Image: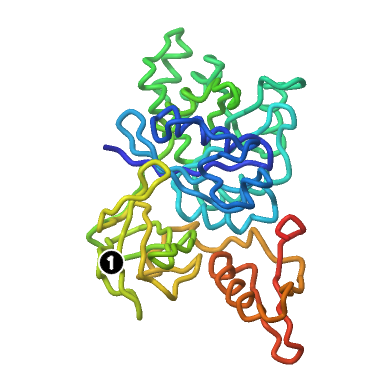
């Protein structure tokens, strides 16, 4: 079975979590589609996400489509959580960038597209919300081309698809100019080569709320986005792109392996791997081993922090280093309602800074005050 590791990105409220919910349900990973507005989205697991109707942390899930096992990382859209987005980019090989058909390209759209391109990650565009009043598919497509400088190829336009596929292949171009239509598999293979070289960016359209265009998106993910590379027999090189806390197991490190393999009881620095799990839908199941190209959850690394590199850093692929998408802009004083809970608050903030090192919770021994560095007001 083939493997795909993809991320889904968008400016806030463009509909990416709704797309994620449809894909999980469509491919049988969940029994019922969740709703952002109703607080039932499967990838919004935190209470604050369900209460506020926004994604705060990147969340991974997996599903099977055709002959591909697809791991999808759903990311926050608000600028305050750009650090989560940056770490998600380390885990993936291809991306879906969602744009509203009403608003077109917005501030975070541009930021995330530039970061993906800098990391060398191929991108599919999905123009969403065609069901809304004021939606304009062609204007949104032009916005992608104008504001992002991206040679977007509308897959709903057969002529545009054929011309884009033939452009970089002399034999196909000669046949097309002579009045022949080359076989579709050859056209798709040619366009795939351009997509992987970041020379073309296929665009699809539809409505996530109504499930329109998302089957075509799944097909495009399999056709145009790459499989992960990496040598399982090489030394270990992996990165922790997210961190969670399990009451029973301790720290749960979400890890992407670029090379080598990792097994239960393997030593990593002062710690030893106690358990390894792989994603099955939105749940995690024991597997005992991960290898290059895979994403999984590793337990037992009590000193690990989000963003940590595991193994040989010289094997890190280009584009998986810190890109500086997010820098704290605010500093807020944190106080417990009950002064006797100061120690507990300090411990909780230290755990939080392990999950998001950019928060940089700090204690002043001189004033006996706690401070947290934030990206913006939404994080408060």
The scheme the figure's colours follow is rainbow
The picture quadrant where one finds residue 304 is bottom left
Q: Residue furthest left?
A: 233
Tally of numbered discs: 1
174 relative to 330, above or below:
above
Write down the residue under mark 1. Answer: 235
Residue 369 versus residue 120 in the image, above or below = below
Image spot of residue 32 (x, y percent): 47, 30
Residue 335 is left or right of residue 187, and the answer is right
Secondary element at tag 1: loop
Query: For residue 50, which quarter of the picture?
Result: top right
The answer to which of 181 and 8 lies nearer the viewer is 8
Q: Quadrant of the C terminus?
A: bottom right
Front residue of 167 and 188: 188
Question: Residue 17 occupies which quadrant of the picture?
Answer: top right
Which residue reaches farthest top?
179
State the residue at coordinates (65%, 68%).
Answer: 359
| Residue at the image position 44 percent from the left and 76 percent from the top | 303
Which residue sits at x=59%, y=37%?
Answer: 16
Whole-percent x, y for residue 128 in the image:
63, 28
Q: Residue furthest bottom?
A: 366
Q: Residues within 10 Å of mark 1 (few under 14, many from 20)?
A: some
Position of 277 relative to 169 (above/below): below
Vertical position of residue 379 compared to residue 370: above or below: above
Quadrant occupied by the N terminus: top left
Residue 324: x %, y % from top left = 62, 62
- Residue drawn at (43%, 34%), measured in percent from left and top? 30
7, 74: nearer the viewer: 74
Most foreground residue, 336 or 281? 336
Percent of width and height locating residue 125: 57, 33
Q: Image check: 380 left or right of 351?
A: right
């Amino acid at each position: 079975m083939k493997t795909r590791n993809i991320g889904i990105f968008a400016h806030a409220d463009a509909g990416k979590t709704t797309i994620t919910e449809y894909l999980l349900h469509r491919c049988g990973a969940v029994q019922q589609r969740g709703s952002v507005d109703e607080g039932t989205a499967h990838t919004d697991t935190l209470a604050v996400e369900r209460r506020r109707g926004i994604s705060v942390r990147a969340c991974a899930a997996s599903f099977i489509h055709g002959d591909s096992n697809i791991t999808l990382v759903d990311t926050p859209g608000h600028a305050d959580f750009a650090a989560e987005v940056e770490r998600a980019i380390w885990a993936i090989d291809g991306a879906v960038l969602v744009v509203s058909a009403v608003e077109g390209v917005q501030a975070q759209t541009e930021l995330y597209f530039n970061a993906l391109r800098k990391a060398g990650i191929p991108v599919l565009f999905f123009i969403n919300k065609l069901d809304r009043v004021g939606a304009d598919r062609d204007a949104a497509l032009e916005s992608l081309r104008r504001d992002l400088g991206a040679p977007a190829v509308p897959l709903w336009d057969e002529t545009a698809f054929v011309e884009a596929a033939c452009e970089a292949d002399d034999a196909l171009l000669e046949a097309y100019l002579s009045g022949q239509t080359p076989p579709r598999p050859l056209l798709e293979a040619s366009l795939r080569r351009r997509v992987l070289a970041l020379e073309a960016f296929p665009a699809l359209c539809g409505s996530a709320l109504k499930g329109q265009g998302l089957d075509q998106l799944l097909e495009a993910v399999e056709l145009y986005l790459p499989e992960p590379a990496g040598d399982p027999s090489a030394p270990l090189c992996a990165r922790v792109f997210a961190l969670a806390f399990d009451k029973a197991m301790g720290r749960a490190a979400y890890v992407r392996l670029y090379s080598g393999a990792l097994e239960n009881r393997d030593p990593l620095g002062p710690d030893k791997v106690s358990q390894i799990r792989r994603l099955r839908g939105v749940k995690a199941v024991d597997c005992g081993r991960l290898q290059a190209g895979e994403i999984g959850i590793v337990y037992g690394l009590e000193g690990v922090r989000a963003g940590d590199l595991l193994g040989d850093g010289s094997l890190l692929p280009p584009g998986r280093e810190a890109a500086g998408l997010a820098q704290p802009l605010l500093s807020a004083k944190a106080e417990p309602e009950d002064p006797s809970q100061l120690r507990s608050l300090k411990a909780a903030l230290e755990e939080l800074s392990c999950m998001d090192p950019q928060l940089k919770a700090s204690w002043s021994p001189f004033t006996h005050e706690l401070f947290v560095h934030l990206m913006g007001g939404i994080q408060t």
